[in-house]
Amino acid sequence: MPLLNVSVKHAGKKYDLVLDTDRPATVFKEAIYQKTGVPVDRMKVMVKGGVLKDDADWKKAGAKEGATFMVIGAAGELPKPPSEPVKFLEDMDESELADALGLPVGLINLGNTCYMSATVQAMRAIPELQSSLAETREATPLTRSLRDLFRTMSNTTGGVLPMAFLTSLRDAVPQFGERTNRGYAQQDAEECWTQLTNRLKDLPGFPNRDGGAPPRSKFVDQYLSGTIIREMKTPEAPDEPPSVTSENVLKIECNINTNTNFMMSGIMDALDTTVVKQSPTLGREATYSVHTRISRLPTYLTVHMVRFTWRRDISKKAKIMRKVKFPTEFDALDLTTPELRAKLLPVARKLGQIESARFERRKVRKRTKAPKPAASADVEMRDGTASVEMLGTAVEVVPVEAETETTAATVASATQADGVPAGEELLPEEDYRNQEHEELEKLVDPSVKADVGASETGLYDLIAIITHKGAAADAGHYIAFVKKTAILQSRPEFLPKLSGGASSSSAPLPDSGDDEDWYKFDDDKVSVFPKDKLGTLDGGGEDSSAYVLVYKSKAI
């Protein structure tokens, strides 16, 4: 259809407009707003057959040359021109784009340093680490440079040059200073994570909530270290007592073989295995079954996807390309000892019920967000109805009161369908959260509560991923993916205070909802990464494959 010269009437005034029938009704409404000042969300445009919908067909609406449309709605202040020229996203450079979108900063690659950049970005998702770094009195050159790097990343909008930290890292771990004839050699991000964590072991930890001394006094021991119980026995010597040992670990491994499709099965393969060793009772080598379970779960659980293995046939380390799916929500109770499972299970079950209720409340709140109706001088109400003359047709207008009653009935039915008591108005979300916290606190085992940094639920959310891209084990490229909320928690106003007890934050965090996206850190290039694309990091080819995953315990 061609361009049509039409008019609109509002508040006794008439305005001439050009209607482009090849464009949607929303464009026409925006043009009306520019003329009348009636906001689109408060505007009703009367056409043949009723109110103009956003997806209306102009042919069915009866649009023709010289037509007059009646507009209903209270006018607001007319839009003002921008103080500065509008600049579109596609015209911005990377720094302007990051600033406009509020993106966090990346780290400039200094020559095969992507392994370090990805590790630092993943560690930045641990706010307690930043608090400990900020308050330590006996800082080493490495911890001091890491603290300064985190501060710089929080106070700038451009890419950061991590030269000071890289120098300290190579001084502390000489293997990261290895050189080839082409410069510095590529290193392993998982090795960087492990080495860096080991050199943070002297950082101070958090006190108990009451200010007392917890069982573990150092940060790494509290928040990053788990404890495993390993039992070894052989069926070849039934009378030989089993060997039981305890060990603190900074990560759990996910072994990958030809049958591994899911992260959980790979972890179980690593925990339950067999070894051949000398038997003290038989006086010879025997096959022992090894049964390992976790007796302490930390707040931050690190999972290492064992993607690199030594191939004897080629005498070289090779990458395992197999696709292994990982969860964004992880239940670690099946990995624990019976004693720990018994302590965590009541809290985990209750938290599951609470999260279901939160999900239902969130759906109800979304459905009940309805725009407020507006009155207009163009319609005279008589006995609950009004007539509007437009396009030569008399149209009956439904009164606002009737529309409001219909909306309320819809909300009530939706509320009842979602499992929230019908007829009851939802309270502020903060009131529900306070009540839920009290209920969960009563279920936490006293020994777990006293162990600062230990998981109180055994349930985890994925917050950071380090991936490896490429086919070669000693080459390729590392990229970090971090959840948006985790980056938000790294801001100074949200960091927990050591002096205030375990996990005491100075400002509340917003509810992230169910559709939270992630950030992708490809050295100094930072972009938004949709949550629904996390499945592309499962592996199965030379593209980015999950290598190190960081899970955070669900808080009560």
Image (cartoon, rainbow, N blue to C red):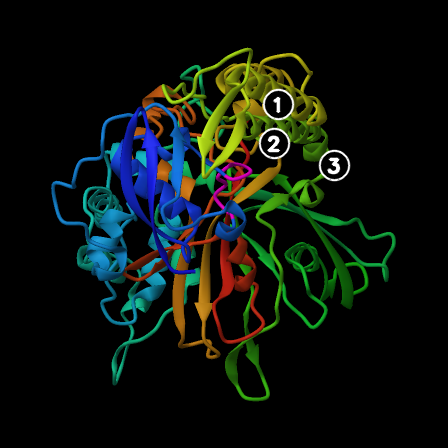
Q: Main secondary structure of the magenta part?
A: loop
Task: Count residues near mark 3 (Cα–Cα under 10 Å), then give few for <14, some for 14-19, many for 20+.
Answer: few
Residue that numbered label 3 is attached to: 338
Q: What residue appears at the point 14 percent right and 49 percent down from the top-left corner?
A: 85
Please determine whether, in this image, residue 222 is positioned above or below residue 89.
above
**Callout 3, which amino acid?**
Pro
Name the foreground residue: 487 vs 122: 487
Point out the image quarter for the N terminus: bottom left
Please determine whether, in this image, residue 432 is positioned above or below residue 1.
above
Q: CA distance from mark 1 to mark 3?
A: 46 Å
Q: CA distance from mark 2 to mark 3?
A: 31 Å
Point out the image quarter for the C terminus: top right
Residue that numbered label 1 is attached to: 411
Residue 159: quadrant of the picture? bottom left
Labels 2 and 1: the sequence-earlier one: 2
Residue that numbered label 2 is attached to: 359
Labels 2 and 3: the sequence-earlier one: 3
Q: Which mark is residue 391?
A: none
Question: Of circles 2 and 1, which is in front?
Answer: 1
Magenta run includes residue 446: no
Name the foreground residue: 1 vs 278: 1
Residue 466: quadrant of the picture? bottom left
